Image (cartoon, coloured by chain):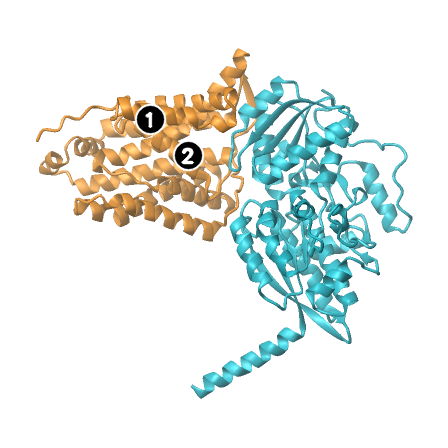
Amino acid sequence: MNPSIIGQMAVSGALMGLVYALIAYGFQLTYATSKSINFGQGELVMVSAFFSLTLTNLGLPYWLMVPGGLLFGALLGLVVERAGVRLALEQKSEGWILLSIILGLFFFSAAENIWGRDDRPFPTPISADPIHVFGVDVTRLELSVAVGVLAIMGLIELFKRRTLLGKAFEAVSADRDAAELMGISATRTVMLSYALSGVVAALAGILVSPITTVGPTMASALILKAFSVAVVAGLDSGFGVVLIGMALGALESLASFYLGSGWREAPGLTLLILALAVRPTGVFGKAVIRKV
Amino acid sequence: MLRQTLYGSLLLAAFGLHAGDTVKLAITGPFTGGSAPMGASTRDGAKLAIAEINAAGGIQVGGRKMKIEIIERDDEAKNERGALIAQELAAMGDLSGVIGTVNTGVCMAGDKHLQEKGVTKIICPAAGSASMTQWSKAGVKDNSIFRFAAHDGIQAAMVVEEAINRHFTKVAVIFDSTNYGVSGRDDMLNQIKLQGNKLQVVAQEKFNIGDKDMTAQLLRAKAAGAQAVLIWAIGPELAAVSNGMAKIGMKAPLIGGWTLSMSNYIDNAGKNGNGTLMPQTFIEEPITPKAKAFIDGYHKAYKVDRIPSAVAAAQGYDAVLIFAAAVKQAGSTDTHKIKEALEDLKEPVKGVIATWNHPYTKWNPADVTTHEAFRREQVVMGMVQDGRVVFGNAADKARLIKEAAGTPAKAPAKPAPKAKVKGKTK
């Protein structure tokens, strides 16, 4: 088969895979500090995208709309933390699983009622015309996804390593109790991680919407893939999710080309099962030794 | 307590009086979701006709004038919702008729309940062949289900004809995995055979509802050398196909079912939709006085400058006029008598799409066209251009203007010059 077609499929897929990676990264952020995951993350992506669309429709330019959307995402993240996660964590229960799902359902209904059930186009100043690079067609829109994903992940990683607040974040991730003894408020740090996770979700929504359109169900397919990526890569490697995300995206589109579009999801799921069987902590995950 | 009872009985009395005085007409369809542009436009077009009839005092039924009362139900394009709604409507007892349904699957799930009770329904604008052929397959002797839409058989024939007329030889057939898409593919392949195998199908590809990335399917079609894409699907996915084609630099026109005129295709595809061709029963161009009045009326009533689905709106409008004519002829609000009248409409009905002369005849299970109003000549080829649907072939436009002016319709002797389509020069 034509190598340029293979290249095309792999590149298109890998670029979409970066969106999976970004959402998976959102899981990692909250998991690091609180060992909890927002199962309604997909709804955060969707609601933030709708909110950003509303901002655009109000006449806000793109460069103002993006921070607005991200801020909204952060607020939503805080809402999830306050309403769903904190209570459960205080009681050391696993209630956050159900609570975050319920909040997600609530956001979904709210979006349906506020914005309707239709898929809508998401205007963007970035052109969707293809550019020809090494025999492969990519659009600026797809490249903007890659740039946006890598930029925000880079920024957050830098923040974690270089700033005091970031160090506190790392400290709580490493050992919550020890960090608290050092005077770091674990609750605040968990809040921060949820806000950041919301920002990441909002950015994913803003980046992917011009390609996929905005609708209440826009994230339901994305979120499953993101889970797979997070699980396969492991829940504590930012670098891992990028790599696995791109690989999964490329694999998916190659599969839909060679095996037929009905088999699109098959390789990803196979990978997931294999990863769970062989390396339950993820390919890039650290094996945790629990001393009792 | 006494007061409450009094109010209650007053209310009941008022309602009872009210019910006897109106023709109850149910309008169903998806008013939300991916099919909403068609469902909502059908409803709004129908309501426009109803408003006009009611403003003129109502329908002459026997000795008195009766207004039309609308019963609106949103089936959300879901088969199970459609079945529930049909059961509810079938159980009402005093319902005169039903107009609506966009999705073939919803027809399949619900219409049997109406047919059992003999409730007259005009399917509008669901076009899938199966929603009528199910009755001939079942061999029902007496059918209360009619259709007012250019069924897929006509549309598929036109799509294939158009591809041949534009001198394409290699085509890709792409469809979605729903009832609608798969039966559309079968219709198209069948038509290619019927029209002398002039088109070679170099690729057959399908996708699912909700798919956004069509790169794999399109690359296969492109690699196989397809000059045109014959397609059967619904708005959002069609847009994903057009956008995907632009991305991989595939310059082949999309020709397919009338869903290509849905606003959620046109809007989401943007400029990538230009040149797309599809059969249409109505084009939103004020070429005749009747069309102008309808378009202006719609824009004004619903405060839009483009009808979300002009075809659905015009069909909804004409379907109501035909239904009203049947009520008048039957001289009754009884749904069975209205059915009899529909099968033998004496007076021509002047609609916005055409003047309908005896649109239906007595049901014959061996021939579904007895309950189909549209023939090939009422359908034209539309083309997307800068966010609107315009006439794809100038000859169609000229013919319609002539017909409206009163000159008898005659098929053009030779093919008229075609409008430009992207990819044709390639």
Residue at the spot 28% in from the left edge and 24% down from the top edge: A277
How many other residues sit within 10 Å of disc 1, few (<14), some (14-19) or many (≥20)? some
Q: Residue B12, relative to residue B110: is it above or below?
A: below
Instruction: Decide if residue B174 is in sight here.
Output: yes
Q: At label 2, which amino acid type do we have? A: Leu
Instruction: Decide if residue A155 is in sight here.
Output: no
Q: Quadrant of residue A121?
A: top right
How many other residues sit within 10 Å of disc 2, few (<14), some (14-19) or many (≥20)? many
Tell me the number on the disc at residue B168: none
Q: Which chain is orange?
A: A
Q: Nearer the viewer, residue B21 or B350?
A: B21
Viewer-side label of 1, 2: 1
Q: At label 1, which amino acid type do we have? A: Ile
Q: Which residue is mark 2?
A: A222
Residue A245 image position (x, y, % from top left) = 38, 25
Q: Which mark sits nearer the N-terminus, 1 or 2?
A: 2
Residue at the spot 91% in from the left edge and 48% down from the top edge: B407
Residue A246 image position (x, y, % from top left) = 40, 23
> At numbered mark 2, what does the secondary structure look like: helix, strand or loop?
helix
Q: Quadrant of residue A147?
A: top left
Q: Residue B102, relative to residue A251: is it above or below?
A: below
Q: Which residue is mark 1?
A: A273
The chain to which mark 2 is attached is: A
Q: Nearer the viewer, residue B194 or B265?
A: B194
